[in-house]
Amino acid sequence: MSNTNKYALITGGTSGIGYELAKIFAREQYNLILVARNEQELNNCASQLRQNGVEVITMAKDLFKREEAFAVYDEIKAQGIQVDVLVNDAGQGLYGEFKDTDLNRELDIIQLNIGATVILTKCFLQDMVARNDGKILQLASIASKTPGPWQSVYHGTKAFVLSFSEAIREELRDTNITVTALLPGATDTDFFNKAEMQESKIVQENTSMGDPAEVAKDGFDALMAGDDKVISGFKNKVMVGMSNMMPDSTVAHNMYEQQKPVDKND
């Protein structure tokens, strides 16, 4: 079936996994709605993606603000556009021990990673249900499967995203709507810079971070197949499998050791 008249909305679509997903959707002839904060980055990405012969609509919105997530939906509805695929990619983390980190920054991250995801999923899902058709891709993480010392709030938000996605997927089992969770591991994007994680062992000593293009392809393929979730990368599948066999306290300790600053003495 032709995708020429279909639209995919991607939050965080100007960099990292989100931009790589946008490139795949454009190659597959989906029209795009890109949502991000930086208007210049949106314009630069849009001009590149339009070379695939698709329409690219840009929306400069700050999803750290609840009302701007609602505004995304309202403005798209006002234009009479039907979103066939929703990709909730936008997300951030914050590095440090919880007792020391900035609470307001963490509350913003909860709004971005959880609040905006819930708002956009709810709004667009109701339209999908009305026509009994649609696909949703949620960016979870292998962080969703483990407690995360040094990134406690981020890991907690991704655990929410995975649980939330699996729950609504089950509610939709008798419809033509699918919800897929993408679980990458450490990926070579700007995430670690934004999270102020450059001094962590996981960044300093990790020479084999995932390729965002490969992560995006894994997510796109799983979405199109209607899968419930996909862990991107063999190493990450092994890590999650091993974690599932250990007590949570052991997993938390291992993660503490992996994520602590390189100069932190035991």
Image (tube, helix red, strand yellow):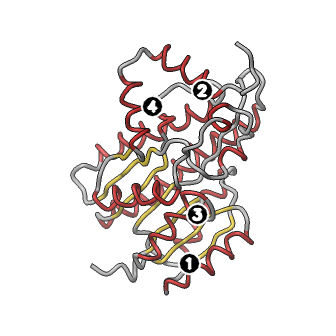
Q: Amino acid at mark 2?
A: Gln
- Mark 2 in CB contact with mark 3 (< 8 angstroms): no
- Mark 1 in CB contact with mark 2 (< 8 angstroms): no
Q: Quadrant of the C terminus?
A: top right
Provide the residue designation for mark 3: 13
Kindly report which numbered mark, 1 or 2, lies closer to the viewer in this rendering. 2
Label 1 environment density (alpha carbons within 10 Å; few <14, some 14–19, many ≥20): many
- Mark 4 in CB contact with mark 3 (< 8 angstroms): no
What residue is shown at x 41% (from left), y 47% (from top)? 181
Sequence-first tag of 4 and 3: 3
Q: Position of residue 185 (x, y in %)?
A: 50, 42
Mark number for residue 107?
none
Sequence-first tag of 1 and 3: 3
- Closest to the observer: 124 or 185? 185
Q: In this image, 176 relative to 166: left or right? A: left
Mark number for residue 145?
4
Provide the residue designation for mark 1: 49
Sequence-first tag of 2 and 3: 3
Provide the residue designation for mark 2: 258
Sequence-first tag of 1 and 2: 1
Q: Amino acid at mark 1?
A: Leu
Residue 203: which quarter of the image? top right
